[in-house]
Image (cartoon, rainbow, N blue to C red):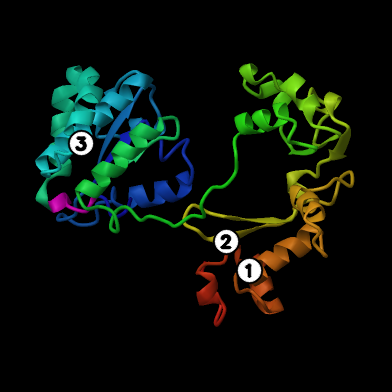
């Protein structure tokens, strides 16, 4: 966001309720500071239903119903792609943009601002997590069209998602394909979609249902085995931030009731020689290049490890 002259938010409260808000606030405000007479500020266009922190900071705010954001996104994409000479999507976008006729003037002026020569590669359109896939695809198409990918928009490579859905699990249970079902947290008896009838379907896992959880709740009552789950503040683990940086999860309190973490349960199921959460986390970071004890301690001290495994195999790169 510190590289963007123009920002368009499609129901994306990026300085409030979205992920990495603290990063976004810092980068957004860098372009809101005037240090000399020649400095320019970024401009923020916000499309949203209710007033958010992002909307409150917007230079131009368009209030629409939540379901109308898709129409605004389609009309914006249609205008930008047309002016850029990309007409291959016009037939698909035109009917989607029809509901946004009432906002025509606002949308066209927003598009013209994005398409100014000085904003080439320095504009960005953001879609909020509440918006459907179609809005995210249109936002991406717009960012590609005015050349922001690789400049104001940096894409991060992520592993391919291979997990199934709860609907696929229900199909497997109904088909008698599941002998042992392990539930890691959650309370699907209470909050799974009603049409899945999960309460009756769960009993089709023969012969065993094992559940790791905090509470004696609705799901607890129908499981064969219930494992006490360790509190997240007493757990070891690791994670990746949105930019791909590896970060540690360190315990902040002494163990409470001798519970198990998800890492520990999965390690035991997988038959790992070392199943302790600390050992699993240590092995993960060793595979990323933090092989020596000094590198491991520095990782814990600094809070994150940046760089690919190839980069780290030689001299570890640690950044504050």
Q: Residue at x 52, y 55 (%)?
A: 159
Judged from the image, the secondary structure of the residue bearing numbered disc 2 is strand
Above or below: residue 205 compared with residue 5: above
The x and y percentages for residue 109 are: 13, 32
Q: Is residue 293 left or right of residue 154?
A: right
Q: Is residue 91 left or right of residue 238?
A: left
* Residue 173, image quadrant: top right
Q: Residues within 10 Å of mark 1 (few under 14, many from 20)?
A: many
- Is the Cβ of the residue at disc 3 closer than 8 Å to that at disc 1? no
- What distance separates the C-alpha of mark 1 from that of mark 2? 9 Å
Q: Residue at x 13, y 52 (%)?
A: 118
The x and y percentages for residue 37 are: 15, 54
- Which residue in the structure is indicated by mark 3? 89
Above or below: residue 250 compared with residue 141: below
* Residue 220, image quadrant: top right
- Which residue in the structure is indicated by mark 1? 299
């Amino acid at each position: 966001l510190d590289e963007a002259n123009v920002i368009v938010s499609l129901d994306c409260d990026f300085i409030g309720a979205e992920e990495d808000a603290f990063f976004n606030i810092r980068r957004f405000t860098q372009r809101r500071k005037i240090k000399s007479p020649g400095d320019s500020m970024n401009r923020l266009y916000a499309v949203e239903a209710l007033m958010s922190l992002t909307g409150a900071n917007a230079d131009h705010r368009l209030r629409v119903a939540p379901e109308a954001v898709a129409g605004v996104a389609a009309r914006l994409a249609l205008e930008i792609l047309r002016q850029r000479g990309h007409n291959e999507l016009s037939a698909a976008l035109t009917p989607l943009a029809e509901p946004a006729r009432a906002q025509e003037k606002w949308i066209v002026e927003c598009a013209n601002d994005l398409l100014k020569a000085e904003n080439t590669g320095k504009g960005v359109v953001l879609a909020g997590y509440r918006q459907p896939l179609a809005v995210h695809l249109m936002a991406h198409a717009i960012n590609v069209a005015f050349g922001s990918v690789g400049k104001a928009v940096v894409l991060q490579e992520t592993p391919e998602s291979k997990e199934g859905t709860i609907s696929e699990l229900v199909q497997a249970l109904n088909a008698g394909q599941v002998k042992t079902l392990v539930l890691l947290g959650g309370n699907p008896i209470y909050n799974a979609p009603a049409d899945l009838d999960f309460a009756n379907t769960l009993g089709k896992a023969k012969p065993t249902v094992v559940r790791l959880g905090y509470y004696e709740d609705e799901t607890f009552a129908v499981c064969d085995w219930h494992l006490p789950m360790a509190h997240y503040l007493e757990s070891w683990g690791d994670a990746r931030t949105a930019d791909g940086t590896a970060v540690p999860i360190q315990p902040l309190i002494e163990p409470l009731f001798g519970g198990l973490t998800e890492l520990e349960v999965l390690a035991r199921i997988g038959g790992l020689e070392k199943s302790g959460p600390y050992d699993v986390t240590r092995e993960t970071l060793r595979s990323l290049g933090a092989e020596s004890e000094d590198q491991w301690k520095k990782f814990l001290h600094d809070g994150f490890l940046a760089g690919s495994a190839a980069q780290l195999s030689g001299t570890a790169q640690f950044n504050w």
